[in-house]
Amino acid sequence: NVSINKTLNLIEYTVTFTVVDAATNPIQGATIAINQQTLTTNASGVATIDLVNGTYAYTISKEGYVNVTDDAVVNGANVSINKTLNLIEYTVTFTVVDAATNPIQGATIAINQQTLTTNASGVATIDLVNGTYAYTISKEGYVNVTDDAVVNGANVSINKTLNLIEYTVTFTVVDAATNPIQGATIAINQQTL
């Protein structure tokens, strides 16, 4: 009797991940959790693993980006997986009121090359990634407000008050012959001048 013991190895195929951002720039340092292993992308945004035929769930993650979850299917050949990670966006909520704290509807907010318009509650929102964004709030009859919105890993609430534009009114009191009258009293807007 002859006994033959032989170990057969399953054929492995290379799964190559290429991870880029929305501008197609490689993302270095992204982690890929697959088959109970963690891979890390190199400076070219690439990471590889050798796997036998099968379907493998994976998650690609990087701080500041939205995770991507999918399956790698290996079926008798090498596999290339190209994935784009998008930056996490946070909601910036503007609330615009007048000096009496009444909501201002129809105020425009210019931010990040977009124009928002406040609703009946004086509210407008935009989703932005981390960064600093200059904005201007305007409404006819009110003084514009300019400031920066700073987004840093969380939603942002911005409350702003618009003040009415004040104008100088000059009164000239004259008689019938258009001669100035000195010391005349003028009553306007519950004030005596």
Image (cartoon, rainbow, N blue to C red):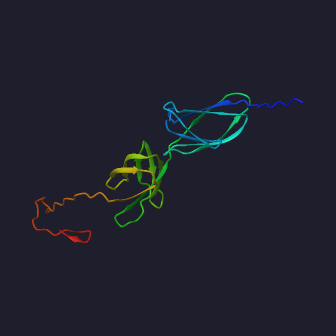
Q: Is residue 67 above or below residue 17?
A: below
Residue 28 image point, x, y percent: 49, 36
Residue 98 image point, x, y percent: 36, 62
Does residue 165 appear to the left or right of 76 in the view shown? left
Residue extending furthest front? 1
99 and 40: which one is in front?
40
Residue extending furthest right? 1
40 and 101: which one is in front?
40
- Location of the C terminus by quadrant is bottom left
Q: Is residue 138 above or below residue 62?
A: below
Q: Is residue 51 above or below residue 158?
A: above
Q: Is residue 104 above or below residue 47?
A: below
22 and 139: which one is in front?
22
Q: Residue at x 43, y 46 (%)?
A: 130
Q: Residue at x 50, y 46 (%)?
A: 88
Residue 101 image point, x, y percent: 38, 66
Q: Residue at x 58, y 36 (%)?
A: 83
Residue extending furthest top? 77
Residue 5 image point, x, y percent: 80, 32
- Location of the N terminus by quadrant is top right
Q: How many marks?
A: 0
